[in-house]
Structure formats: structure tokens, C-alpha cells
Amino acid sequence: MSELTNEAALKDAGNDHLLMHASAYKALANDAGKRILVEGKGCIVKDIDGNEFIDALAGLWLVNVGHGRAEIGAAMARQSATLAYASSTQATTIPAIQLATHLAEITPGDLSTVFFCSGGSEAIESAIKIARQYHYHNGEPKRQKVIGRRGSYHGATYGAMSVSGTRPNSEPYHSPFMTGVLHASPPYCYRCDFRQTHPGCGVLCADQIEQMIQYENPQTIAAVVAEPISASNGIVVPPDDYWPRLREICDRHGVLLITDEVINGFGRTGKMFASEHWNLVGDIMTMAKGLSSGYVPIGGVICRPHVVEAFEGDNKLSHLLTYGGHAAACAAALANLEIIEGEGMVENAAKMGARLLDGLNGLRGHRTVGDVRGLGLLAGVELVKDKDTKEKFAVSDSAIVDLNKGLQDRGLLTRAANVISLSPPLCITEAEVDRIVEIIDDSLTEMEKGL
Ligand SMILES: Cc1ncc(COP(=O)(O)O)c(C=O)c1O
């Protein structure tokens, strides 16, 4: 095996041999935004050149407990030394049963039974397949179509990409998509598709989904898939009457509601699951990311009893994944949940989230800050060229390039495009929250000088 120890050799080898996700070949050399990270503690990560950053996106919206929690690694090591793996179809393991049982206890309502997989995209694929097969066994085999929402992101595999409302970005390369997918308007009040204002609008965006269901014929619709709060669409927190209405529409038409809590779950929004803000219970709920805080790849879907009961007797689930319920991954997730619950991280997310939102609201005086929104430690600052017209910046605009550089130079790792997205570890302190706001403030001031 090649000895790669020094920094220059590692960078060269990384360029030659690693194709980074959603990146150009040799991105490490050519894109100042890419780096080799070597260690982390809490909210802070350090790169190979010794630079320290606040990890304000918790990796990719997932390191909920923060970096450097050795006890998660220790739990994995113990399980790997005992039994790392059992066939996902012929056997299961003690940690898989313990984790599924605990998830049934902490997830909303009567969600009760878990199918494990390796990440968020697989969770969405699994949820769609379970929904379609559920209808088949209930004597409605024509219920195959799935309704997603524009701007939502549910993953990069084919089914997940197809139901995602970000698919225009992939269309030139990856179409044709999965058939039978429709996309509705999101509850994005700042840019309402119907040019309405809440509450006068009467949540037309939810009613539009009902119109789609009726137009297509309800007997052809398997499921609606949606994140309680859409991060990809710019941290879109829906108005309070949206979810009760959509839940009721799905129930009335026999359509399963798949709530995608891949980013929202495990304390991120100041509740264990974002659904709890609206007493929402999806028929199937997807999870990943915060389930292990990224210490190991694991995801899952949890179903309500009426869904899994369709799979009794001869009606076997026609779906399997080799790594589903991996014993060491389940042990890591259990250790992660023990930290989240034992250290009051959900409560801290609510408290620090309120402080973060307060601080960000203080930036509304900037000429480019069009909107500020969020819930818990999931927050966004929407940038506009003009507050009256709400004209958007293009990602390639020099102002956005400068802004990203300004944020990084000041020690903040996050994503800034039309929206500056924030989703730091839930262990964040007051001082770190204040520093995030200060860095954004300074970076916006500098960017605006160039406009
Ligand atoms: C809401 C949501 N669902 C699903 C996914 C896909 O998860 P993964 O990247 O683990 O496949 C993501 C990824 O960011 C997501 O944000």
C-alpha cells in the first residue's frame, strides 16, 4: 500500500484518485472551497493546513452530536469484535432490534416498525417501494404514482432523484426519470407560486396537491413525499395550517404520506422530529443523517402498523439491501442517540436555534438580505439583488463567489448560494452561535461593497 503521509503527496493523490461528490475532477487542486479535513471536536473542524473552521453545516446537515465523540467509535468497535454483520434477509442482530425498538418509542404517533438501509436516498427508495407494494396487497395495484414538491431534495439514486424537485439540475444528464412522478408547489411563502400571502391564501399549495390527486384519479396515486421543513428549497418552514391540511388530504384519498426527516430528524429543529411541531405523523417516515450523526452510514424507514400489516403472510417485502441493519452501524446509532438524549441536545437545539434566528434577524438591514427563516438549528438567510423585485443571485455571480470566500476566510464552513444555509452541530455554544452571526454580518458587508 502506498505510504501517503505528507501533505503535498496526499493532495496530489487526492486529485488523481478521488472523484469528489458533485465536484469536478481534480477539485482539490482547482477549487478553493475543497479541502482535506483531519480532525474535529464539537463544532470545530481542522484542515490539513492547520486552519480551523466552525462547521456550520455539521458536515452535510448531519453531525448532530458534534465531532470527536469517541464513545460512538468505541460502541462500533465492541460490536464489530463481537459480530459485525448478519445477512439482512436470514438473520438480524441484537443492536438492530434494540435500535428499531427505540426508534418506535421516540418517533411520532404510532410509527412502529423499521426497515434499515445505508442512507437517505436508500430510505426514500425503500419508502416508495413499500408504498407501492402496500397498495398492491391492498387490492389497488394501480396506485403507483408519487407526488413530490418543486425544490425538495430526496436523494441522488434514480427513484429519489426522480421525486426530488431539484431534478431540473440533473435533467440534462440523467433523464428519463422514473415515470409516474408529479411535482407540486412548495409552501414557500417568500416566493409564493400563487402570488398570495398567508393566511389569506388558505394554503393553496396544499390544495393544489389535492387537485393533482383528483385530476390524476386518486386510485393511481401511491404517495406524497415531502420534508416537514425543506432544507434544499432554502429552509422553507411551512405555515402552521399546511401540514394538518395535507395530512387530511392524503387520508381522504387513501394516499400514503411519506415524511422525509432525513435532515429534520434527531433534534435538528428543536424537537426530536420536525413533524412534532405540527402533530404530524407520516404513514412512512424516512431517516438517516442524524440517526448516527454521520459516524457511520445508516438510514431507515419507519412505518405505521397499517402499512406493515400489508406485508403479513405470503406478502413478503420485495426489497432487500445487503447492508440494511448492519450490526456495527446500529450500535453506532444507539450510542449516538444516547448522547442526543442524555446530554439534552434537542433542548439545546431549541435554545441555541432561537438565539441564532434572533441574531440572523438582526442582519435584515443588509441590502441583500431578503428573508431570514428557520426552526431550531436549521436556519437560512435568503439573499436577493433587490428587495423589491426579489431578484435572485446566480450561484456563479461574483458576489456569491466572494461571499463564500469571505465566509471561509473568516473560519465558517457552510453553503451560500441564494440562501446561506445553517445547520450546525446541536452541541453548539452561545459564543459559537454569536460568532456565526458575526462572520456572516462581516462577510455580507464586504460582499455588498463590491456590488
Ligand atoms: C431531505 C433529504 N432526503 C434524502 C436525502 C438523501 O440522503 P443521502 O445523501 O444520505 O442519500 C437528503 C440528502 O441531503 C436529504 O436532504
Image: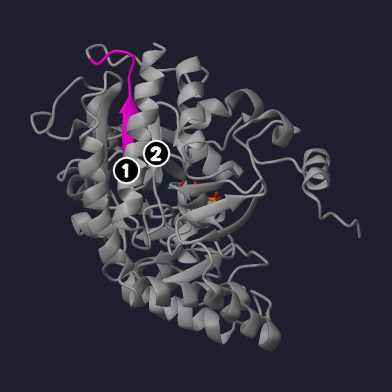
Left or right, 449 with reference to 3: left
Q: Where is residue 436 in the image (x, y as percent from the top left)?
A: 36, 43
Distance between mark 2 and mark 1 Cα atoms: 6 Å
Q: Which of 369 and 136 is in front in this view?
A: 369
The quarter of the picture where the N terminus appears is: bottom right
Residue behind mark 2: 421
Element type at marker 2?
strand
Q: In which quarter of the view is residue 86 placed? A: bottom right
**Alpha-carbon neighbours of circle 2 within 10 Å: few (<14), some, or many (≥20)?**
many
Is residue 148 located in the magenta-colored stretch of the structure?
Answer: no
Left or right, 87 with reference to 388: right
Q: Where is residue 265 in the image (x, y as percent from the top left)?
A: 37, 59
Q: Which amino acid does label 1 sit on?
A: Ala
Q: Where is residue 170 in the image (x, y as percent from the top left)?
A: 58, 29
Q: Which residue lies furthest to the front in this view?
A: 50
Q: Is residue 49 visible?
A: yes
Report the coloring of the rendering.
one colour
**How many numbered marks have been drawn onto this rendered protein structure?**
2
Element type at marker 1?
strand
Q: Is residue 192 visible?
A: no
Q: Earlier in the sequence, mark 2 or mark 1?
A: 1
Q: In this view, does 317 lie above or below 365?
A: below
Q: Which amino acid does label 2 sit on?
A: Ser
Q: In which quarter of the view is residue 200 placed? A: top left
**Alpha-carbon neighbours of circle 1 within 10 Å: few (<14), some, or many (≥20)?**
many
The quarter of the picture where the C terminus appears is: top left
Kindly indicate whether the residue at mark 1 contacts the one at mark 2 (C-beta within 8 angstroms).
Answer: yes
Q: In this view, does 282 lie above or below 215?
A: below
Q: Where is residue 346 in the image (x, y as percent from the top left)?
A: 30, 65
Residue shown at 68% from the left, 85% from the top: 83
Residue behind mark 1: 379
Magenta extent: 380-387
